[in-house]
Image (tube, rainbow, N blue to C red):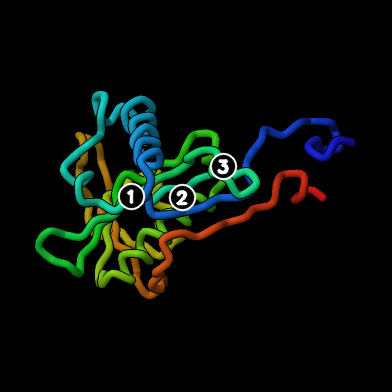
């Protein structure tokens, strides 16, 4: 039997087993993050007409999830940005969390982007971290120790204003972490 086929000979689509979650530092990463945001927020969800860029893009710290093959970057598969409040250096916010459609079944990917964003902010002095969250993602954030503090409207769509319980987010000073997962045939073995 082939290593990528199940016992009933069903082939699995390729999904990388190695990922890097890192602060964006290269031009290609920034361009790929913007392209992924446009795919998710403009084309898939139609929340924005053509471009989701805003004033936060100039000062936000962007984090990318990159699928790797043999240690080399292969595809940008997720992104989120975080930013410090203009009037309160202890209050940070996250926004524009996006995961490539082919990788949304990797449930940990969005969670780790959130963890890395919040823990990075904590390392930089954050005492309160919040985000406007689409209602369909509420349970993901609640599993990660967030609570709803209010409701809001973003781009004429309902959102939940949620806040992270920072006791569950130790400071993370590393700009990059590596993550390895088992492939479907390794899990089945």
Which quadrant does the N terminus fall into? top right
Residue at point 44% right, 43% down?
A: 78
Q: Which residue is mark 1?
A: 62
Q: Secondary structure at mark 1?
A: strand
Q: Say which of marks 1 and 3 sits in front.
A: 1
Q: CA distance from mark 1 to mark 3?
A: 22 Å
> Of helix, strand and loop, which one carries label 2?
helix
Position of 12 relative to 65 (above/below): above
Residue 4 x %, y %: 78, 37
| Image disc number at residue 110 | 2
Left or right: residue 24 compared with residue 124: right
Task: Give the side of residue 16 with respect to residue 38, left or right.
Answer: right
Residue placed most toward the observer, 13 or 179: 179
Query: To which residue does mark 3 refer?
Result: 105
Task: For label 3, count other residues whose C-alpha is less than 10 Å away and answer few (under 14), some (14-19) or many (20+).
Answer: few
Per the rendering, the mark at residue 7 is none
Q: Residue at x 41, y 61 (%)?
A: 175
Please say if the residues under marks 2 and 1 sit with CB atoms less than 8 Å apart.
Answer: no
Is residue 106 or residue 89 the one in the foreground?
Answer: 89
The image quarter in which residue 51 lies: top left
């Amino acid at each position: 039997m082939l290593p990528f086929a199940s016992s009933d000979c069903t082939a699995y689509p390729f999904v990388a087993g190695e990922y890097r979650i890192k602060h964006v530092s290269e031009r290609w990463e920034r361009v790929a993050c913007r392209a992924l945001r446009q795919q998710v927020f403009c084309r898939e969800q139609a929340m924005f007409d053509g471009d989701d860029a805003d004033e936060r893009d100039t000062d936000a710290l962007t984090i990318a999830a990159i699928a790797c093959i043999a240690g080399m970057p292969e595809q940008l598969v997720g992104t989120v940005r975080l930013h410090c409040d203009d009037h309160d250096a202890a209050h940070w916010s996250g926004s524009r969390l996006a995961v490539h459609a082919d990788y949304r079944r990797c449930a940990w990917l969005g969670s780790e982007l959130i963890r890395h964003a919040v823990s990075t902010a904590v390392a930089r002095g954050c005492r309160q971290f919040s985000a406007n969250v689409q209602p369909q993602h509420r349970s993901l954030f609640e599993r990660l120790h967030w609570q709803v503090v209010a409701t809001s409207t973003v781009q004429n769509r309902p959102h939940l204003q949620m806040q992270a319980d920072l006791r569950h987010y130790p400071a993370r000073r590393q700009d990059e972490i590596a993550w390895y997962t088992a492939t479907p045939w390794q899990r089945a073995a």
